[in-house]
């Protein structure tokens, strides 16, 4: 728990869970965009923009909520 303030088991769980959730959501978006009749370029643009919103909205939110917390970098890492 020293250093980042995160237990090893929690860190490993995050390393497994976060990419799985991200890839799963991208697969759902791909199927959704593809079924609605969008062109290949529109599907790629939609998937890129949808995945980037996490960073655009999540980072300022985490910075505001955990302002002054010494573990802020660890909280921002998954984003």
Image (cartoon, grey):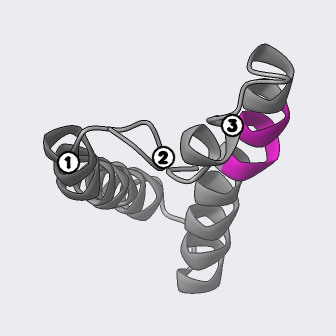
Whichever of labels 1 and 3 marks the residue nearer the N terminus, that label is 1
* Image coords of residue 77 (percent x, y): 56, 53
Q: Is residue 31 magenta?
A: no
Q: Nearer the viewer, residue 12 or 26?
A: 12
**Residue 47 — which label?**
none
Q: Residue furthest top?
A: 65
**Could you tell whether 52 is left or right of 12 in the image?**
right
Residue at position x 22%, y 55% in the image? 20
Identify the residue at image location x=47%, y=57%: 33
Majority secondary structure in the magenta region: helix
Query: Is the residue under label 2 in contact with that under label 1 (CB below 8 Å)?
Result: no
Residues shaded magenta? 55-60
Secondary element at tag 1:
helix
Q: Nearer the viewer, residue 64 or 72?
A: 72
Instruction: Please name the residue shown 46% across and 53% down the image.
Output: 36
Task: Residue 39 in the image: state x and y as whole percent.
Answer: 57, 78
- In the rendering, which numbered label is found on residue 4? 2
- Give x and y (percent) for residue 67: 84, 23
Q: Which secondary structure lies at badge 2? A: loop
Label 3 secondary element:
helix
Crowd class of label 1 (few under 14; some 14 to 19; many from 20; radius 10 Å): few
Query: What's the CA distance linking mark 1 and mark 3?
Result: 17 Å
Q: Which residue is mark 3?
A: 72
Residue shown at the point (71%, 51%) measured from the top left: 55
Left or right: 66 with respect to 19? right
Q: Position of residue 8 (x, y in %)?
A: 20, 48
Q: Quadrant of the N terminus?
A: top left
Spatial CA distance of label 3 from label 2 is 9 Å
Q: Are marks 3 and 2 in contact (CB under 8 Å)?
A: no
Q: Which residue is mark 1?
A: 8
Q: Residues within 10 Å of mark 3 (few under 14, many from 20)?
A: some
- Label pair 1/3, CB-CB below 8 angstroms: no
């Amino acid at each position: 728990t020293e250093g980042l303030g995160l237990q090893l088991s929690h860190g490993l769980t995050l390393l497994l869970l976060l990419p799985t959730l991200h890839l799963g959501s991208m697969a759902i978006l791909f199927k959704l965009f593809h079924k609605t009749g969008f062109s290949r370029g529109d599907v790629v643009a939609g998937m890129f923009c949808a995945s980037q919103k996490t960073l655009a909205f999540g980072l300022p939110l985490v910075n505001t909520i955990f302002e002054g917390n010494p573990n802020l970098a660890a909280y921002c890492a998954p984003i």
